[in-house]
Image: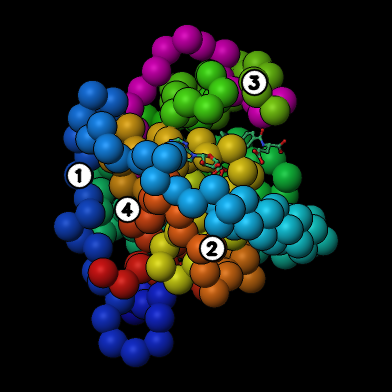
Amino acid sequence: MTRRQPFTAGPGGADGDEQGGSPPCLAAQIAPDYFDPLAVDAGQARDVARWRKARREELLAHRARLGVAERQAIAAAIARGLDEVLAAHFPDIRGKVVAGYWPIRSEPDLRPWLARLHDRGALLALPEVERRASPLVFRPWRPGALMRRGHWNIPVPDTADRLVPDLVLAPLVGWDGAGYRLGYGGGYFDRTLAACQPLAIGTGLQAARLATIYPQPHDIRLAAIVTEAGLQYPPR
Ligand SMILES: Nc1nc2c(c(=O)[nH]1)N(C=O)[C@@H](CNc1ccc(C(=O)N[C@@H](CCC(=O)O)C(=O)O)cc1)CN2
Ligand SMILES: Nc1ncnc2c1ncn2[C@@H]1O[C@H](COP(=O)(O)OP(=O)(O)OP(=O)(O)O)[C@@H](O)[C@H]1O
């Protein structure tokens, strides 16, 4: 039985199969006109930023109210959806680099799933904000590794090494049916996905779905979104 669901009612969730594969992170590959801040209407961008800030606060408050058992059940269901992603895109995970995240602010804790991947021979990584307003870097990590406090007090592996991920989990504060992500407002994932093209999978609560996040030129669509309701591919 497949738990895959299209984002929208009606025919045609894309199967996303062509979205696998991942050229290495080469910032030089970015088209120089990829994101031109001057092409954005300043008033509209300000309105969208204000709207997103209000939605973030509501969504984070809702998530913080979930009980421990509910949170664990959600994380376990998301882990099952992620196993489907692996089966579809990385049937042999050995030697592949999977970037997870160290949970903050009531994000689903997927470290148990990451630990299972480690046992299956995947290389794990966690993101770090090394420089403000820059792409994230990914540090090699394994369960039990020594951590230090990074930007925003987020724990990061205590190493200067880096990895280039094949698969990246992007934790969602909110999301929409077109596959766009609302995060904590730093723009870090968008900058990261503009600089390299791993398979990017959003993970979060089904209840965090918005009709639209009013995508802006800098917003990059995720390949798929996994919630406790299953694996969902955006329409083509
Ligand atoms: N667990 C986890 N780790 C993660 C992420 C995540 O979403 N979850 N990130 C995913 O990207 C990166 C950290 N993201 C961050 C995003 C915003 C800000 C920040 O300073 N926010 C400002 C608001 C910015 C603005 O509105 O202009 C703030 O709250 O003051 C910090 C870190 C890397 N690590
Ligand atoms: N590729 C980019 N180049 C330059 N600025 C960017 C880029 N991507 C995002 N930004 C800037 O980052 C700011 C925050 O973006 P946005 O609201 O999409 O954050 P977010 O996706 O919620 O944050 P995060 O990924 O850090 O959790 C925006 O003002 C945007 O202009």
Stretch in magenta: 153-167
The residue that mark 2 highlights is: 213
Residue behind label 4 places its C-beta within 8 angstroms of ligand 1: no
Distance, label 3 to label 4, CA atoms, is: 29 Å
- The secondary structure type at the circle numbered 4 is helix
Quarter residue 103 falls in: top right
Which residue shows up at 31% across the image and 72% down it?
235
Residue 151, x across and y down, in percent: 65, 23
Question: What type is the residue that disc 2 sits on?
Answer: Ile
Return the mark for residue 68.
none
Distance, label 3 to label 1, CA atoms, is: 30 Å
- The secondary structure type at the circle numbered 2 is loop
Which residue shows up at 72% across the image and 49% down it?
106
From the viewer's perspective, is residue 41 above or below residue 158? below
> In the rendered structure, which disc, 3 or 4, sits on the residue that comes first in sequence?
4
- The secondary structure type at the circle numbered 1 is loop
From the viewer's perspective, is residue 234 above or below residue 43? below
The residue that mark 3 highlights is: 150
Q: Nearer the viewer, mark 3 or mark 2?
A: 2
Which residue shows up at 76% across the image and 61% down it?
58
Magenta span includes 156? yes
Q: Nearer the viewer, mark 4 or mark 1?
A: 1
The residue that mark 4 highlights is: 86
Quarter residue 144 falls in: top right
Front in this rendered view, residue 122 or 230: 230
Question: What type is the residue that disc 4 sits on?
Answer: Leu
